[in-house]
């Protein structure tokens, strides 16, 4: 598979996280990769705490946080260094954290060891950026937040299909995507230029570690509910599309339109049962 330009900042951040002495240093230096914050006042504990709040908020909003979670398994696509993963290990019986970068997964294991249940954690590297190395129908739920927007368009759709494949019938997916907003008139071409700059000799990797250009460049696709459902819709049941309350509904037939104030205006969630 050809190397994807949007992988450059993740690989650079992974290398940086691997070289840091402590997880606190990782958060202070590269935390913006995961939650858009840096600074000497940050710590891994504070970083994980933000994930604790979001996992509960999203799962409750999606009606997916039930007593059954204690006996179920969840796959997290795009775990990073474990900001949300630690919380998942306290909720679910088994958690499989998936990510493109091996260094992130190593840090993820360290994060869960401190703040979660390491006995419930497995990790799986997404080597090609589009395939989950997991068995068919092996999970009760697949969850992905602020990850699929960083993939190549076709890779994001492939990962959505993979999410459905590894979920058992009757299980659920909760996948976060980014779609078009008015600001993309400027942001989309700017992002393409930034991604091109990452291939420049010597300076490319330096640019990739800068917060502003990385944020512009790693948002590598925009996907509408119509596009995603064309790829996975036939395998789904009870489909809900969650959007922010300030965004107009997508008006997709045979889906339930729902709002949640935690959803950014440029984002939407596909929440559904697998047939």
Image (cartoon, rainbow, N blue to C red):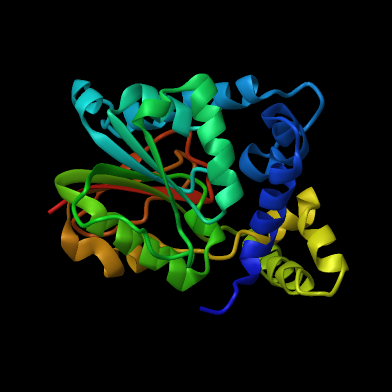
Which residue, as the protein is rendered here, is positioned at the far right? Answer: 203
User: Is residue 263 in view?
Assistant: yes
Above or below, 25 relative to 228: above
Q: In this view, does 22 lie to the left or right of 236?
A: right
Q: Where is residue 32 in the image (x, y as percent from the top left)?
A: 70, 41
Above or below, 235 relative to 97: below
User: Is residue 82 in view?
Assistant: no
Residue 173 vs residue 177, the one in the foreground: 173
Q: Which quadrant holds residue 172?
A: top left
Task: Locate the C terminus by quadrant.
Answer: bottom left
> In percent of the image, x 56 and y 25: which residue is there?
48
Above or below, 204 relative to 19: below
Q: In this view, does 248 lie to the left or right of 169?
A: right
> In percent of the image, x 45 and y 68: which residue is there?
155
Residue 88 vs residue 218, the one in the foreground: 88
Q: Position of residue 199 (x, y in %)?
A: 76, 74
Q: Which quadrant holds residue 30?
A: top right
Q: Is residue 256 left or right of residue 216?
A: left
> In percent of the image, x 28 and y 26: which residue is there?
65
């Amino acid at each position: 598979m050809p190397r994807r330009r949007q992988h450059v900042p993740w690989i650079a951040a992974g290398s940086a996280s691997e070289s840091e002495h402590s997880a606190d240093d990782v958060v202070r230096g590269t935390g913006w990769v995961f939650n858009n914050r840096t600074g000497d006042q940050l710590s891994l504990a504070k970083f994980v705490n933000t994930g604790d709040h979001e996992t509960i908020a999203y799962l409750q909003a999606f009606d997916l946080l039930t007593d059954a979670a204690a006996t179920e398994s969840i796959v997290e696509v795009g775990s990073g260094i474990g900001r949300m993963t630690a919380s998942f290990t306290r909720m679910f019986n088994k958690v499989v954290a998936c990510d493109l970068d091996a260094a992130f997964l190593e840090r993820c294991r360290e994060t869960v060891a401190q703040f979660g249940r390491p006995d419930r954690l497995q990790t799986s590297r997404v080597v090609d950026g589009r395939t989950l190395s997991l068995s068919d129908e092996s999970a009760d739920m697949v969850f992905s937040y602020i990850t699929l927007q960083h993939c190549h368009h076709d890779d994001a759709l492939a990962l959505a299909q993979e999410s459905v494949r590894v979920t058992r019938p009757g299980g659920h997916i909760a996948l976060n995507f980014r779609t078009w907003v008015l600001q993309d008139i400027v942001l989309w071409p700017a992002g393409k230029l930034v991604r091109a700059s990452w291939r420049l000799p010597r300076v490319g990797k330096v640019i990739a570690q800068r917060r502003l250009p990385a944020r512009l460049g790693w948002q590598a696709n925009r996907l509408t509910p119509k596009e995603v459902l064309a790829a996975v819709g036939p395998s789904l049941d009870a489909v809900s599309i969650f959007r922010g309350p300030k965004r107009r509904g997508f008006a997709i037939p045979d889906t339930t339109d729902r709002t949640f104030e935690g959803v950014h205006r440029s984002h939407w969630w596909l929440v559904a049962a697998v047939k």
